[in-house]
Structure formats: structure tokens, C-alpha cells
Image: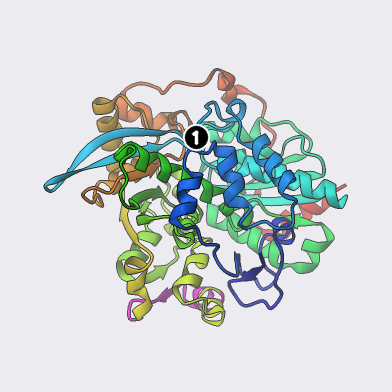
Amino acid sequence: MLYLSTRGHTDRKRFCEILLEGLAPDGGLYLPETYPQVDAATLEKWRGLPYASLAFEVLSLYIDDIPAADLKAICEKTYTEEVFGTAEIVPLRKLENASTGSARTDVYLEALSNGPTLAFKDMAMQLLGNLFEYELARRGEELNILGATSGDTGSAAEYAMRGKKGVRVFMTSPQGRMSPFQQAQMFSLQDENIHNLALEGVFDDCQDIVKAVSNDLDFKRKYRIGTVNSINWARLMAQVVYYFSGYFQATQASTGSARTETPKVSFTVPSGNFGNVCAGHVARMMGLPIDKLVVATNENDVLDEFFRTGVYRVRASADTHETSSPSMDISKASNFERFVFDLLGRDAARVADLFGVQLSKQGYFDLSGDAVFRSAAQLYGFASGKSTHVDRLETIRDTFKRFGTMIDTHTADGLKVARSHLQAGVPMVVLETALPIKFAETIEEALGRLPDRPAKFEGIEALPKRVLVMPADAALVKAYVANNVK
């Protein structure tokens, strides 16, 4: 399996090369040359596999430069009940049987937030930590990870990498823009290989700096810079697995053992940087029978605007709303480039023009008059919707009142939007993104009570903080990295 850049860089690389590299040298994102195909017989063969075994089957289609026995051991080490709190790893929970005209449709939550930091980012980050440690040991090298977080990526990365041999983490985050719990999770870590940089700006500023450093090839090579953001293909690839697991659970629950044809399932995904839902796109391209991929945004509705109008218009920092679902307060969706690459028939020159030229010059591009825009829905199954603070509060209240289930603000965005896209007889799986405790203030506003807090996080906000606040300046970040690499 070889990987190419969305912007046309001529080199083709194998998995372990791009694992440690992040962005391609031309600023593009890596994708496989072709998506491996999974037929109905293979789906049935995989149905019922333990999650670690399913992960091995999916990942082995993309990784051929790690021996199978080693990859299997990495998957089994990663996806355990001890780490994720349940043997199912990502159990499905039925919420309702909703009316869709003359028929009914099952709506589910897929629990992705049982890992160490209570957010779906653990699903990929735990694997990434083990892959990094394995490959660096094999090469006898070290890696300095530079990342950006709007809330959950940072803590997931730091908990996955803390204590890992040969790895340092430099995580940027927008000063004051994360919830108190999210900040405490990251800033209370005292491990020597973990560095937190709170930048005076928004998440998009942090992400732009990570990309700028990655595009400085001399600096990147000298200081062995890698990334854990979802621009790293390995992270997105790991997320593909839980679409297969969710599909198997939803179709088993909906049809029992009486399956006469291959059923379809839809997924709704709370979206900011497009990585989570892009993994669903990859699963669909592999042959997983996904009907709709519904992109749910908050007030920062850049993605919803595109899927409604064909215009992708990024916002300036001053126009990026600070909301009660802060991990989605993003106006430049990095992984969107991967989908547009497929949407445009893998025309790398055109992708380079759209993302490398038009966005930098005018801040938007417009595909509304292009025939390919219609295929976003027709061929790739995408739909979208928007949720606001009022919607979040109402959805949290309704879900708790009717089903006794407490959901976080981002999952509430997903559930609200999902209900506008139900189809008769097609199960709808909403991806849970975090546990409610991470956004306690809004939960209390909605329900008049605080969410339950896992015992290991009692008093976390009062712990000593280890964080450096600095301007959002790439040169300053590079200087800090250089001064802290031994």
C-alpha cells in the first residue's frame, strides 16, 4: 500500500514513513493510492469479531510494512477493557424508535468516550502512541510531536504519549477557549516529555502554526517534527474501525439474524475539523454500506454552508464564535481537503489551487456551479445541519428526560441534526464525542445539576498547572521547540 499527497507531490510512500511525517512536503495530506475494497462476504466474516481483532483486519489493509504479528499485538495492546472500560470498546446504545412517516427508524448513540480522557480522540490516539513507540524503537530514533487542540485532541495525545520512549509532545491550544475540565486535563500533567503552549488566539491560529512549522522542511527535519492532529493519516485510519463496529452492532440490533440483503446504516457526526466524519467517508469508499454521512456543526457552520451551497468560506479569528461546544469552534477544517480530493476525481492540481491559492488569496472557493458538487450528496452520501446553544440545551434536556441518558454538548449537536435526516428503515448512529463532565457548566445550565465525575478526575481543576501562555506566532513556537529538544 502506497500513499500520495492531495496536492500532487510525486513521491509515493509507505505507511511507516507517513506515520512519522504528518503533512506531505507540498503541504498536502496523505491518502492511500486506492481504497481497499471490502465485499459482503468479508463483512459477514468480520461481524462479531472482538474490537481489537476488527481493528487488526481493517488496519492490515493499509499497513504492509509492519509484520502482521506485530500489528496484531499492537491492536491487542491498545483496545482493552482495562483502557476503555468495557469489553465492547464502543458499545451501541439505542435511544429511540423515531417516526419517519409510515415507518419507524432506530436511533443509536455509539459510545466512543470511554477511554482515558473521556473523549472519542482516545480511540485513535491510544493506537497512535503505540505505533509511534514501536516504529521509533525499530528505527532507534526520537520524535517531537507538534499538535493543535480545540479541546480533546490535546489531552488524548498527552495521555497516550506520556512516558512513551523517544517521544516529546508540544501541544498548542487557544488560551481560554477550552472548558475548565479540558484545560485541567492537559495542564495538570507534569511529565517531562509533555509541553503545553496556550496561544493567544483561536484554534485555527494554532492549527495554522502547526501547518507552517510542518511546511518548514529544514526545521521539520532538523528537529524531527511529527504530528498527532488528524492531518496525520494514521489517526484518521484508526477512526475508520469504529464505523465498521457501529455498523455491525446497528444492523444486528435492527435485523437480528434474519438478513436477506445487505442493510444500510447512516451516521451523524459532530464536526469541526472534518477528521471524524472523513473516517466515515473512507469506510464508505471501502464498501461499508453507509447510506448518509450527516455533518453536524455548531454556530461555526463552515461545513454546513458548503454542503448546502457549494461555497467553502473560512472565517477569520474574530468571526469564529466561542460556543458551548468548543471542540467544534473551528473555521478551517483541515481534513476537508481529503474529501475534496476525492470529490474532484483526485485532481491534485485543482486541489492545490483551491486550498493553496484560492483560500489564501480570497478566503473561500466556490464549487456551486460545478457538477461535482452535486455528487457530494448523490455519490458520497453527505448531508449536513447546524445546531445552536438553544438547540443543545433542549436536546440535552429532552434526551435526559425521555431516555435517562446524559449527553455532552457536541453529541447534542449531533443528535439534534440527526433527527432532521432520518429515513424509514435505515438505522441512524450518532457518534458520541465526549462525556458530559467535560462540559459541566452547560450541563448544569440545561439540567440544573452537575454530571457525574469519574473518581480519578476528582479535584483535577485544583491541581498545579504546567503551561506557557504566548502570542500565536510560529517563530516563537519554533524557538520554544528548539530550546526544549535535548
Residue at 34% across, 65% down: 307
Residue at 41% across, 45% down: 247
Residue at 58% across, 72% down: 6
Q: Is residue 367 above or below residue 48?
A: below
What residue did someone put label 1 on? 113
Q: In this view, does 3 lie above or below 486?
A: below
State the residue in front, 233 or 412: 233
Q: How far from the left and from the top, in percent, is residue 336?
A: 48, 63
Q: How far from the left and from the top, in percent, is residue 433?
A: 45, 40
Q: Residue 359 magenta-drawn?
A: yes
Q: How far from the left and from the top, in percent, is residue 311?
A: 37, 71
Which residues are drawn in magenta? 356-369
Q: What is the secondary structure assignment of the residue under circle 1?
A: loop
Q: Which quarter of the rendering shows the N terminus?
A: bottom right
Q: In this view, does 398 lie to the left or right of 356?
A: left
Residue farthest along the left direction in this orientation: 102
Q: Is residue 7 above or below residue 56?
A: below
Colour style of the rendered protein structure:
rainbow
Q: In which quarter of the image is residue 14?
A: bottom right
Q: Quadrant of residue 458?
A: top right
Q: Is residue 211 above or below residue 43?
A: below
State the residue in front, 275 or 77: 77
Q: How far from the left and from the top, in percent, is residue 358?
A: 50, 78
State the residue in front, 234 or 243: 243
